[in-house]
Image: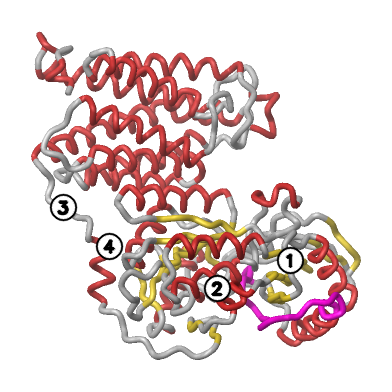
Amino acid sequence: MTQIFDNPADFADEALDGFVAANRGYVARVDGGVVRSTEVPAGQVALVVGGGSGHYPAFAGLVGPGLAAGSACGNMFASPAAGQVYRVAKAANAGGGVLLSYGNYAGDVLHFGQAQLRLNAEGIETRTVTVTDDIASAPIEHIEKRRGIAGDLTVFKIAGAAAEAGLNLDDVERLAIKTNYRTRSLGVAFDGCTLPGAADPLFHVPAGQMSLGLGIHGEPGISEHPMPTASELADLLVSKLLADKPEDAGDRVAAIVNGLGTVKYDELFLLFGKIEKLLTAAGLTIVEPECGELVTSLDMSGLSLTLLWLDEELEQYWAAPADTPAFRKGSMAPRAARAAATIDDAETADVEQPTPAAAELGRQAVAVLAQVQDVVVEHEEELGKLDAIAGDGDHGIGMRRGVDAAAQAGEAASGSSVSRVLANAGEAWSERAGGTSGALWGSAVIAAGLALGNRESYSSKDAAAAVEAFARAITELGKADPGDKTMVDALLPFRDAFLAELDGGAPVDRALAVAAAAAESAAARTADLRPLKGRARPLAEKSIGHPDPGAVSFGLIAARISRHIDSQLAAVAPSTAAGNGAAE
């Protein structure tokens, strides 16, 4: 049980602060996580890893030469927010591009994906490789759906070594993908883990039993078994991994026995000895094995076995030196300390003087955010009730939290360019709202701001670009299609109507009115759809006959913005409110 803390809510941040204090020769604190405190060669690819706290040495303990350049650190067992990932990546970037890598969990995919969109839009080439090594979480034919557990280490290690060797982003990404494909893991648990401040573990395994395939956050295992002997456990783990080996597997493997928190090193060593004999008997040669705590789960009683089938190329990078707070291999030359100013500068390098037009549009964006806040507050209870029919009922409160934070952040940035106002607002929305809708709305607001930029003047073409960027961020990040019964079912009719009206010569305010009407109508029609995505999917029958809350909230917001723009134009020029000049 985790007992050392002042306030459980501050546990993750205070633990990270202490980690940095104990390892200043390796890492420096940035808003959202840590980056290397030593010099990084100009042009080197930056491997940025991350995930929830509570898994040390993953993820901050793996930052250092030969491994990661930075780590985004979320709350306990929670994905880091997109803004955290973005800020860590900006500080870690050395000019060679960024590779994001993390375990394949829905929250991480959304928030890292949002950060990737923003980084790419700002000209920092960014790629992603998710780790999918856990054979218990999906069958081999759906390997892309598997979650990442201790196989994080193999992917991070080889990608980090490749970056250290000076390979370009294409090759670092290729090697990470190759390593992930050739990595397999399987874990077991004997009892659950306890979050700071909690009186009881997240779960229990019945006395005398072992849960097979249980995830590192307490996700259910695939089966329970009577507590085995060490020899029986070794045979179970080895046999299941060998049965799942990649098609091009050779006879050389890196083997990792990983403790999840409370299994003692003596026990891990005992088990590794038995695993080593079984792998050797199967004709495999073990190359530079690891045995210890590498990806943990607070105080969980459990362990996992990971096998990486090596080829000549992968073996070279698996064996390469690394020097981090928690993982060291070989010998590396000492690195000079990185100037603190370069870390700070990376976080503020994109600040620019707004043009008069961009500043004015930024002030208008602040007013629009206030309108969005008003309509969400007005309909918060209604949206929550609608979501509760087939979901968890938090859509109203989630939207409220997000838009409250966005409006406040936008107001604080008033006077900046519209791009900066919307970037701050979107980042705040994502971090405060959490969940899928928070990540999607945050990403879309940021994308719209980036599309508008900091220009000398704006026209209807810029409005079209902003709407297209907003929609693209939602569809690329959320992966939903029309008919899945999500916000996309209202968003895409809005986008299509808006662009069609502009193409036909309509002013922006008229195009917005038509698009908003299309969105509200499309949202109402989602009542006839069966949900294929999101939390409503498992209770699909209950959802039929009721519109999707995400589509409804989007329609309400679109309509409110349209009415606001109309009122503003009418106040400025009543006689020409529909004129192109005023609308643009």
The local crowd at label 3, few if under 14, some if 14 to 19, many if 20 or more residues have their Cα within 10 Å, is: few
The residue under the point 84% across, 63% down is 206
Position of residue 375 measured from the top left corner of the image (x, y, whole percent) = 36, 27
> Between marks 3 and 2, how big is the CA–CA gap?
37 Å
Secondary element under disc 4, as helix, strand or loop, is helix
Question: Is any atom of residue 431 visible in this view?
Answer: no
Secondary element under disc 3, as helix, strand or loop, is loop
- CB within 8 Å, label 4 to label 1: no
Q: Nearer the viewer, mark 3 or mark 2?
A: 2
- CB within 8 Å, label 4 to label 3: no
Start-end of magenta stretch: 278-298
For marks 4 and 1, the one nearer the N-term is 1
For marks 3 and 2, the one nearer the N-term is 2
Secondary element under disc 2, as helix, strand or loop, is helix
Foreground pick, 456 / 578: 456
The residue under the point 59% across, 31% down is 388
Position of residue 390 measured from the top left corner of the image (x, y, whole percent) = 63, 30
For marks 4 and 3, the one nearer the N-term is 4
Where 428 sits versus 180, above or below? above
Q: Quadrant of residue 99?
A: bottom left
Give me the disc on residue 249: 1
522 sits to left or right of 353: right
